[in-house]
Image: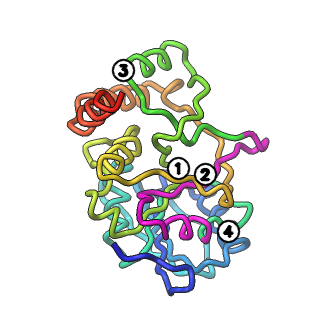
């Protein structure tokens, strides 16, 4: 696998999906324009019809308007294929940037053993969010649903998908996100497959972004059902079975 050097002219694609989130998109674009010195090209996917504010950003933007609503995985996979790149980043529209996160993430991806690089995620009050987590189990998932909130988790097995950076070649080689997940667990599944391929999740602490967890599945029935369906798919998947077998052999 070729190493990507910061001094090379790397092409960074930032994939953002909007579900009627034009105001958040405008704030994210303003943040990128204000604090990011690393050149990026944004692929903005409009997942359902909506009017967008006049963005006029100082960086290239490719707008994709879906004719039918697609899931998180399918949308980001399509964005990765839409524009050639060396680095592919997945960014939620409600993320806020305090400083340029892309240079530290690209630096982390220079290590060929790193499959995905993620930033340190803090809340708007400055509190560290649980963006990196331990592998879920059916038991811990049931506990979370029953409790109605996520227990404290500072594991380093996988990273939540609000902000992820990949070498595009790695993302493609691993098969991207599994589009059978409409929402939830597609990030965990991808990290699991990266681990099985001998690659690790790396947090770049010099890259700090702001994101307040929404926990929509605890408040809205549709999101709760998506969460349950995705959890069942993950725990029945070949990747999870292989992960469990590997951990059993090493214990």
Q: Which of marks 1 and 2 is nearer the N terminus?
A: 2
* Position of the N terminus by quadrant: bottom left
Image quadrant assignment for residue 166: bottom left
Camera-side mark, 3 or 2: 3
* Position of the C terminus by quadrant: top left
* Numbered disc 2: secondary structure: loop
Q: Give the range drawn in magenta.
A: 103-127
Q: Distance between the residues labelled 1 and 4?
A: 16 Å
Instruction: Residue at 49% x, 12% y: name it.
Output: 146
Q: Distance between the residues labelled 1 and 2?
A: 9 Å
Q: Mark 1 points at which residue?
A: 162
Q: Name the residue under label 2.
A: 94
Image quadrant assignment for residue 127: top right
Tag 1–tag 2 contact (CB < 8 Å):
yes
Q: Distance between the residues labelled 1 and 3?
A: 23 Å
Q: Distance between the residues labelled 3 and 2?
A: 29 Å
Q: Name the residue under label 4.
A: 100
* Numbered disc 1: secondary structure: loop
Q: Mark 3 points at which residue?
A: 138
Q: How crowded is mark 1: few (under 14 residues within 10 Å), some or many (20 or more)?
A: many
Residue at the front extreme of this rendering: 250
| Front residue of 13 and 152 | 152
| Front residue of 245 and 96 | 245
Q: Is residue 31 above or below residue 197?
A: below
Q: Earlier in the sequence, mark 4 or mark 3?
A: 4
Camera-side mark, 1 or 2: 1
- Residue 235 at x, y = what percent? 29, 28
């Amino acid at each position: 696998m070729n190493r990507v050097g910061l001094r090379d002219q790397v092409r960074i694609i930032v994939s953002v999906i909007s579900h009627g989130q034009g105001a958040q998109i405008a704030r994210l674009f303003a943040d990128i324009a204000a604090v990011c010195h690393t050149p990026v090209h944004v692929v903005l996917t409009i997942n359902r019809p909506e009017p967008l504010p006049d963005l006029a950003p100082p960086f290239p933007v490719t707008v994709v308007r879906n004719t039918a609503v697609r899931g998180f995985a399918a949308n980001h996979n399509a964005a990765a294929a839409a524009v050639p790149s060396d680095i592919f980043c997945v960014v939620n529209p409600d993320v806020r940037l305090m400083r340029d996160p892309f240079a530290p993430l690209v630096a982390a991806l220079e290590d060929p053993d790193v499959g995905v690089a993620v930033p340190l995620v803090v809340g708007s009050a400055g509190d560290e969010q649980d963006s990196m987590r331990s592998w879920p189990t059916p038991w811990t998932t049931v506990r979370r649903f029953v409790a109605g909130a996520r227990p404290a988790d500072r594991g380093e097995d996988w990273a939540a998908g609000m902000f992820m950076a990949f070498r595009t070649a790695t993302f493609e080689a691993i098969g991207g996100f599994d589009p059978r997940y409409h929402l939830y667990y597609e990030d965990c599944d991808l990290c699991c497959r990266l681990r099985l391929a001998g690659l690790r999740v790396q947090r770049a602490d010099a890259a700090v972004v702001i994101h307040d967890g929404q926990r929509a599945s605890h408040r809205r029935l549709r999101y709760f059902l998506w969460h349950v369906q995705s959890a069942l798919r993950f725990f029945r998947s070949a990747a999870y079975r292989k992960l469990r077998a590997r951990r059993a052999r090493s214990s």
